Amino acid sequence: MITMKDIVREGHPSLTKVAQQVDIPITEEEKQLLKDMLTFLRNSQDEEIAKKYKLRAGVGLAAPQLGVEKQMFTVYYVDENEKVHEYALVNPKIVSHSVEKTFLPTGEGCLSVDREIEGYVPRYSRITVKAFDMDNNPVKLRLKGYLAIVFQHEIDHLNGIMFYDHINKENPFHIPDNAKPLD
Ligand SMILES: O=C(O)C[C@@H](Cc1ccccc1)[C@H](O)SCc1ccccc1
Ligand code: NI
């Protein structure tokens, strides 16, 4: 079972490298890792399990955060309509995006960052992502809102980019002209 000790922290080289493309079809070992990563996210959002194993809540996890420099990530969260958004994807590419940007008014955090870093993280409001799922099927996803933000945070991890790399250094709370806070 993945716990916080398996998650690498700032300073670990995996977090600032471009991860390797994964050969398709993926191996059984890679498929099992994706399943284990999804289980971590579900566990991290379960009050009892998270308390028992001291897990920080997470809605996304990328393989480089486990020191595995492969283009793989998972997302798991339940939205306000109780809809489960669960993804385990390989070799994702943002193939198109809106000009318009958005940001979380509360800023972002990261399971690999053990400190609060304030400031707005501009993200594309809408993205189209092409990837492969864990059964080697090609997928094309059109995303907006919070899910689009989570995907961009995770895909950044596959390219060695941390959320704070997007924060304006002169004014962390600078709002770009074409950006609107996520409602
Ligand atoms: O470190 C990670 O990649 C997981 C992040 C992903 C994330 C952070 C900010 C904005 C979008 C995605 C964690 O989920 S941060 C902790 C968290 C937990 C529940 C809800 C929101 C953020
Ligand atoms: Ni992160």
Image (cartoon, rainbow, N blue to C red):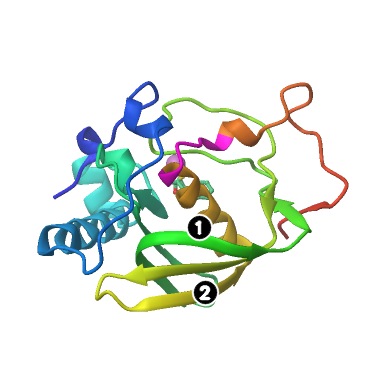
Q: Disc number at residue 22?
A: none
Label 2 to label 1: alpha-carbon separation? 11 Å
Please provide the residue range marked out in magenta: 158-163
Question: Whole-percent x and y of residue 4?
Answer: 25, 37
Question: Whole-percent x and y of residue 11?
Answer: 37, 21
- The residue that label 1 is drawn on is 151
State the residue at coordinates (52%, 67%): 129
How busy is the neighbourhood of tag 2: few (under 14 within 10 Å), some, or many (20 plus)? few
Query: Which type of secondary structure does the marked residue at label 2 adopt?
Result: strand
Q: Within the magenta stretch, is there residue 160?
A: yes
Question: Whole-percent x and y of residue 30?
Answer: 18, 58
Q: Disc number at residue 141?
A: 2
> Is residue 54 at all visible to an observer of this figure?
no
Q: What predominant SS class does the magenta segment belong to?
A: loop
Residue 77 higher or lower than 4, as above or below:
below
> Is residue 5 at all visible to an observer of this figure?
yes
State the residue at coordinates (47%, 25%): 115
The amino acid pointed to by label 1 is: Phe
Query: Of circles 2 and 1, which is in front?
Result: 2
Q: Nearer the viewer, residue 174 or 95?
A: 95
The quadrant of the image that shows the C terminus is: bottom right
Q: Nearer the viewer, residue 45 or 120?
A: 120
Quadrant in the rendering for residue 160: top left
